[in-house]
Amino acid sequence: MEFRDKVVVITGASSGIGEASAIKFAKKGANIVLIGRRKEKLFEVEKKISEYNVSTIVCTCDVSQKLQVKEMSRKVEEKFGNIDVLVNNAGFAIYGKVIDLTIEQIESQMATNYFGMVYCIKNFLPKMVEQKSGHIVNVASVAASFGLPGIVSYCASKFAMLGFSEGLQHELKETGVRVTVVSPIMVRTNFFDHPSFDSMPKYSTTSLSADTVAKTIVKAANSSRLEIIVPSLVRGAVWAKHTFPYLINPILGSAFRKRFESSKKN
């Protein structure tokens, strides 16, 4: 689709990948709905994209709260009538072993990363189906394909996101609505600002910029593919893991356990 005058809804839009995506879509003439919990940050992003002369709306909303999502979607529909692209980007992780995390910490990650996506889709999908067009872009992670120690709860939420998206894609066949998952490796954003990450290195030499992932999100909004892995060469590792799990899983598990234990000692 051409994005000029289209309506793009982005969750987690106050910084990082969400902010970069908002700028990319605005440059292409799309009207932007900025969703997040930090109103001041959202207004800063709105100011940045104002130079592109597009319509914007700031919605303070915690996507883990279904009533807030319902109210947010009502406001968006009142202003624009319909939406063309939904980018489910809001998400976070808490670093630590399952035995050390509280149930509430595990639940909170699933609430935002997975159910936040579900709530947004449930509120915006009927309008997309009615208009027979639209694209849902769910921002997952390579962790949607690898269960890794230290971020088990986060991996579970992204596994769930990928599975939900795959099933939904089948359900939406011939409706005119598409679903694409964007799964990047480590990204240099404030994702690692949570105190639980204080004892571990923040970024690897292969980590991506938010801008790189945002470019892929824009591409995904015009793609017929279920999943786009960033960078593409990592798709080989995902293929190997699914094809030879008995070889790959022990290697990955050992490597990440060593890193996890090392970070706890520092």
Image (cartoon, helix red, strand yellow):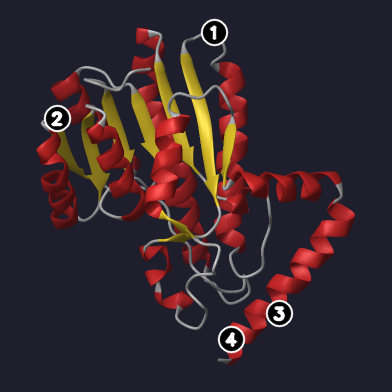
Give amino acid for label 3: Lys
Q: Position of residue 181 (x, y in %)?
A: 53, 36
Residue holding disc 1: 174
Give amino acid for label 4: Lys
Q: Nearer the viewer, mark 1 or mark 2?
A: 2
Q: Nearer the viewer, mark 3 or mark 4?
A: 3
* Separation of marks 3 and 4 at Cα, in angstroms: 10 Å
Tags 1 and 3 touching, CB below 8 Å: no
Q: Nearer the viewer, mark 2 or mark 3?
A: 2
Q: Secondary structure at mark 4?
A: helix
Q: Position of residue 54 (x, y in %)?
A: 14, 30
Tags 3 and 4 touching, CB below 8 Å: no
Residue holding disc 3: 258
First along the sequence among labels 4 and 2: 2
* Separation of marks 1 and 4 at Cα, in angstroms: 50 Å
24 vs 128: above or below = below
* Separation of marks 1 and 2 at Cα, in angstroms: 31 Å
Q: Secondary structure at mark 3?
A: helix
Tags 1 and 4 touching, CB below 8 Å: no
Of residues 60 and 263, the one drawn nearer to the viewer in this rendering: 263
Residue plotted at (63% across, 74% down):
99
First along the sequence among labels 3 and 4: 3
For mark 1, does the 10 Å Cα neighbourhood hold few (<14), some (14 to 19), or many (20 or more) residues? few
Residue holding disc 2: 54
Q: Secondary structure at mark 1?
A: loop
* Separation of marks 1 and 3 at Cα, in angstroms: 47 Å
The quarter of the picture where the N terminus appears is: top left
Residue holding disc 4: 264
For mark 4, does the 10 Å Cα neighbourhood hold few (<14), some (14 to 19), or many (20 or more) residues? few
194 vs 234: above or below = below
Residue plotted at (29% across, 34% down):
25
